[in-house]
Amino acid sequence: MPRRKKESAIDPITESPVPQHRAGFCVIVGRPNVGKSTLLNLYVGAKVTIVSDKPQTTRRVVRGILTRPDAQIVFVDTPGIHRPIHPLGKFMVRSAVDTLDDVDVIVFVADGSKMPTREDEDIAEMLNERAEAPVLLALNKMDLLKRDMVGEITQAFFDLVEHDDWMRISATKKENTDKLLDMIVARLPEGPALYPEDEITDTPMQVLAAELVREQLLINTRQEIPHSIAVHIDEWEERSPQLTYISATIWVEKDSQKAIVIGERGSMLKKVGQAARKEIEAWLGHQAYLELIVKVRQQWRRDDRLLRELGYSLD
């Protein structure tokens, strides 16, 4: 249940409400590849969740924290809600749905340049039945919206989901995102900050490092690879104040996929490792030594034991 808002204090001289600090949780939901992670990273001002043009890039619930003088918003990014076909998919969907409980605001992000899809309809039905916090409808990708489709698409989403307010935005071009943010803050309860003001995520560094490696794999490998990849940190050792040693395993489902990830004479693995290491070092603030190996586990997305090791367990 979302927390109830407190009554604002009244200035005894002006008899007007005294501005109060607001803090709370805002969950971002939507189908895969509609811009949820891009919006979160924009608000937080740093990459706390990975982004690619591949659907279902986000597999875990990720929290990003925006702190400003008048408010602290804890954004909760979720995996895209879809119809799962294997245990990994079930974990992703249940993780997303469970975040709807005990939040203060729900932002339903949709691709506002197109008519609603079946997945949009499923999410809207779930929100209409389950949501207790106010729902804000964010019609993203306004820069791709054709002028002659504005009314039809907008009305289709209005009819689809019960919402408290709405905004047409472009997360990539930062259009109207400030207005959406004001809508979110206005619906948070009054209260003190929930996290230290210098904290922007509560994701463990080891988990973030694994995701940064997976991001580079998503960006650089072929279309058939992305959903078949997982990354696990096997060893993390602070060898000195200026050097962290990291060993990670990249899991794929087929020998052919392993060959693609490694590349000719190891070229792809080297490219991925160099790019991921730079991202990791930016977070650590010092040098990292990143060692990557590639292993095959057929149908690992259906392997309960490996899913537990990777942190994708439904238990």
Image (tube, rainbow, N blue to C red):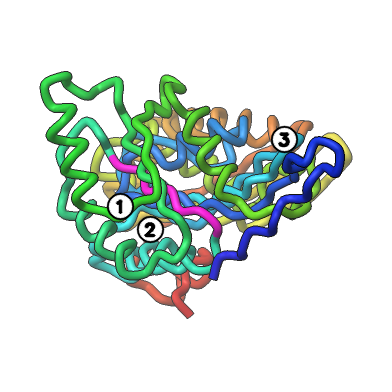
The residue identified by callout 3 is 68
Of all residues shown, which one is farthest toward the bottom? 315
**Lower sequence index among marks 1 and 2:** 1
| Figure check: 140 above or below 158 | above
Specify few, some or many for label 3: CA neighbours under 10 Å numbering under 14, 14-19, or 20 or more.
Answer: few
In the rendered view, does 314 fall on the left or right side of 301? right
Local secondary structure at mark 2? strand
Which quadrant of the figure has residue 140? top left
**Neighbourhood count class around disc 1 (C-alpha, 10 Å): few under 14, some 14–19, many 20 upward:** some
Disc 3 versus disc 2: distance between alpha carbons? 46 Å
Q: Is residue 100 shown left or right of residue 17?
A: left
Residue at the image position 39 percent from the left and 50 percent from the top: 164
Q: Name the residue under label 1.
A: 255
Report whether 209 appears left or right of 97. right
Q: Which amino acid does label 2 sit on?
A: Val
- The magenta span reads 104-110
Task: Compare marks 3 and 1 and give the one earlier in the sequence.
Answer: 3
Magenta-colored segment: predominant secondary structure: strand
Q: Can residue 145 be seen in this view?
A: yes
Q: Of residues 54 and 176, which is closer to you in this image? A: 176
Q: Which residue corresponds to the image point at 77% horizontal and 32% vertical from the top-left?
A: 285
Q: Label 1 is placed on what type of residue? A: Asp
- Please report whichever mark, 3 or 2, sits nearer to the chain's N-terminal start: 3
Could you tell me if the residues under marks 1 and 2 are in contact, i.e. CB atoms within 8 Å?
yes
In this view of the protein, which residue sits in the foreground, 172 or 296?
A: 172
Identify the residue at horizontal 42%, vertical 32% (top origin): 268
Give the x, y percent position of residue 224: 24, 44
Which residue has dot 2 on it? 296
Residue 248 visible in image: no
Amino acid type of disc 3? Arg
Instruction: Give the structural element (helix, strand or loop) at label 1.
Output: helix
Q: Is disc 3 placed on a helix, strand or loop?
A: strand
